[in-house]
Image (cartoon, helix red, strand yellow):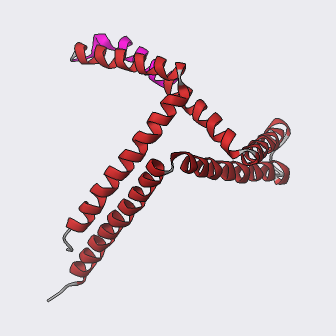
Amino acid sequence: MVTASDSTGRSIARSFRTAFIVGGILSVVLGLLILIWPGRTAQVLTGIIAAYTIIAGLVYAAVGIASGSKRGWSRAGHIALGVFFVVVGVVAFANLAAFTISFALFLGALVGILWIVEGAVSLSTIGHARNRGWTIAFAILSLIAGVMLLFSPLWGAIVLWWLLGISAVALGIANIVRGLSMREG
């Protein structure tokens, strides 16, 4: 005799299975797009970010203009931020290739700075570490990688982009296998 809870359990398991398989397929497709057409895929991602920026800018500006409860700097700040976002989005669409490279340079430099800070913070915690050797090794590697990214942020962004593509394919395959190997109920 099949109970309602058995049916619900099978339905939930089927939903998880489907989610893993579909998510895995999407991850593999994204990873392959990054690996096969890295520049075009980066431009598409930049275009999506630019579209989001324009939409967010319109929302901020609308909130600033239409809000009766906001006064002074709050209202002006929302409008100014909205206009800024719209301008950035329009400029990005005006020359998507150049903006993609600029965005990659910015992200490469940002990751470099973050790794340098992370390495410095790790060095500051050596006194609290259970294993000082690993903490020092991590800090040194983080500092070196951060400095390398600062000296060549575009190269670093390209390497990180390729690693993202490889990771997306590998994790997508793992999720597909995971979904296919799940039992129902």
Q: Is residue 110 above or below residue 122?
A: below
Counting from the top left corner in percent of width and height, residue 80 is at: 81, 40
- Magenta-drawn stretch contains 124: yes
Q: Is residue 117 left or right of residue 17?
A: right
Q: Quadrant of residue 160?
A: top left
Q: Quadrant of the N terminus?
A: bottom left
Counting from the top left corner in percent of width and height, residue 81 is at: 77, 40
- Magenta-drawn stretch contains 128: yes
Q: Which residues are magenta?
A: 113-130
Q: Quadrant of residue 104?
A: top right
**Viewer-side residue, 175 vs 39:** 39
Counting from the top left corner in percent of width and height, residue 92 is at: 72, 44
**Viewer-side residue, 79 vs 26:** 26
Q: Residue at x 24, y 61 (%)?
A: 177
Q: Is residue 82 visible?
A: yes
Q: Quadrant of the C terminus?
A: bottom left
